[in-house]
């Protein structure tokens, strides 16, 4: 018998077109042709989780208490470890009981937070280009996305003065992300102070995504949004073990900051999930509280890769700012190429997978993103192939 008529809900039909479909198809085609593929497409660390964290999981996974439902908001020891880490890393004081909750990866918290605060028609300010979850989480809550373009002229920071007053008045929530994916831009306290004032003026909840705070180079130390005066009055910050400790597969993160905002997010979460596996929380505690040598090594490794890519790009005459943080390089397309065209060119002719900038939002047009997720030798090879193919 034929199946029933299965129609997707409005919220799924509203999703923006998947701009990577054409690239995915082309990648399969190039792979089928037998060409060796170098993938600089996905922002996922290529090295394993440090051994001491895995060992902690091994021990913690055998404890009976961890076989039962975990506490929804995170076990007290996990929340305390996050608060202690914020204290020592950023000098930000947090009450573990009310100002920290656990998340099943920061993506989960980012996707859910609009459900707690956004009513149909409310505006959400979303950077453009950006990590796609800010926009999609807004759609799932039936909110209206207002893009804040990030341009080279403004150092890839949103121009708060350019947000129309009537939009700001109808805005419930805004997302920001520094160090930034995909542009690798960083923000300093002056910008965050301005942001707090703006949020106060219009009662906007600021959601800062700080996933890349530890992936920084040349001694640079990214700050937290919560370093701004009064930040805790207006918002929260998402942080994650994913990028810092090569733990993208583990799904452990946190949201910290304004207690009322976290309580709202928690009210959604207690009805959707039942928290993070206790053993994974214990591994997260270990990651944050143990000696941080593995993080220093991670920085050194990505800095070496970054230098290889920057040198290669300079030789090719391609323009990109030298990233102070993140494992992305945001490369301007050469004359005569759109983002899609240049991505297709390096894929077809060089077997190098990159991400077209317009896939992160309309203002990403004219750029492609390289992820530094393969060893130096492969990065060199990728750039040599691009040089040989020309453009
Ligand atoms: C990788 C990444 C994250 C981390 O996501 P998790 O769900 O914690 O793994 C968050 N935000 C941005 C912008 C990212 O690129």
Image (cartoon, rainbow, N blue to C red):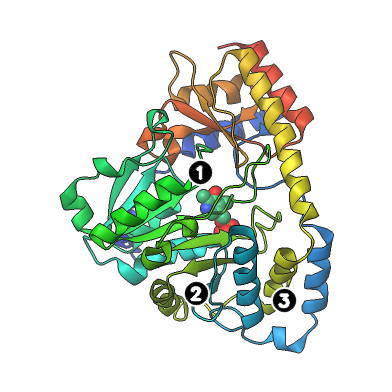
Left or right: 57 with respect to 125? right
**Which of the 4 quarters of the picture holds residue 89?**
bottom right
Tell me where residue 13 appears, x and y as whole percent: 32, 54
Image depth: mark 3 or mark 2 in front: 2
Residue at image position (44%, 62%) is 111
Against 63, residue 255 (above or below) is: above
State the residue position of label 2: 99
State the residue position of label 1: 180
Q: Return the residue nearer the eye: 333 or 300.
A: 300
Q: Residues within 10 Å of mark 1 (few under 14, many from 20)?
A: many
At mark 2, the secondary structure is: loop
Q: Is residue 172 visible from the viewing direction of this image?
A: no
Image depth: mark 2 or mark 1 in front: 2
Against 170, residue 221 (above or below) is: above
At mark 3, the secondary structure is: helix
Q: Quadrant of ligand 1?
A: bottom right
Q: Residue furthest left?
A: 166
The CA span between labels 2 and 1 is 24 Å
Left or right: 179 with respect to 57? left
**Which of the 4 quarters of the picture holds residue 370?**
top right
Q: Earlier in the sequence, mark 2 or mark 1?
A: 2
Residue at image position (55%, 51%) is 223
Q: Return the residue nearer the eye: 5 or 112.
A: 112
Q: Is mark 1 within 8 Å of ligand 1?
A: yes
Q: Residues within 10 Å of mark 2 (few under 14, many from 20)?
A: many
The answer to whether the residue labelled 2 contacts the one labelled 1, judged by CB atoms less than 8 Å apart, is: no
State the residue position of label 3: 279
């Amino acid at each position: 018998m034929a199946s029933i008529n299965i129609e997707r809900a409005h919220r799924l039909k509203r999703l923006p077109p998947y701009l990577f479909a054409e690239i995915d198809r082309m990648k399969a085609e190039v792979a089928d042709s037998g060409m060796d593929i170098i993938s600089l497409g996905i922002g996922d660390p290529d090295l394993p989780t440090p051994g001491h964290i895995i060992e902690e999981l091994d021990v913690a996974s055998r404890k009976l208490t961890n076989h039962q439902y975990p506490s929804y908001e995170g076990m007290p020891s996990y929340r305390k470890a996050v608060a202690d880490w914020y204290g020592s890393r950023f000098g930000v004081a947090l009450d573990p009981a009310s100002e920290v909750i656990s998340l099943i990866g920061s993506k989960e918290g980012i996707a859910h937070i609009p459900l707690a605060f956004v009513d149909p028609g409310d505006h959400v300010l979303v950077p453009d280009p950006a990590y796609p979850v800010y926009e999609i989480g807004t759609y799932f809550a039936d909110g209206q996305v207002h893009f804040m373009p990030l341009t080279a002229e403004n150092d890839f920071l949103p121009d708060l003065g350019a947000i129309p007053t009537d939009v700001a008045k109808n805005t419930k929530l805004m997302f920001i992300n520094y160090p930034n994916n995909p542009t690798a831009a960083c923000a300093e306290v002056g910008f965050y102070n301005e942001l707090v004032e703006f949020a106060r003026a219009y009662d906007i909840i600021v959601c800062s995504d700080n996933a890349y705070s530890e992936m920084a180079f040349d001694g640079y130390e990214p700050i937290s949004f919560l370093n701004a005066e009064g930040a805790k009055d207006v918002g929260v910050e998402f942080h994650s073990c994913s990028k810092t400790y090569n733990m993208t597969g583990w799904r452990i993160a946190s949201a910290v900051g304004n207690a009322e905002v976290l309580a709202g997010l928690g009210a959604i979460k207690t009805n959707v999930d039942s928290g993070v596996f206790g053993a994974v929380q214990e591994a997260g505690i270990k990651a944050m509280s143990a000696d941080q040598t593995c993080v220093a090594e991670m920085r050194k490794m990505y800095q070496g890769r970054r230098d290889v890519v920057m040198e290669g790009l300079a030789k090719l005459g391609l323009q990109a700012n030298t990233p102070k943080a993140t494992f992305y390089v945001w490369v301007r397309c050469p004359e005569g190429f759109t983002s899609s065209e240049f991505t297709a060119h390096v894929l077809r002719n060089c077997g190098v997978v990159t991400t077209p900038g317009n896939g992160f939002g309309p203002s990403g047009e004219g750029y492609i993103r390289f992820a530094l997720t393969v060893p130096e030798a492969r990065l060199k090879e990728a750039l040599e192939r691009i040089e040989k193919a020309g453009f």
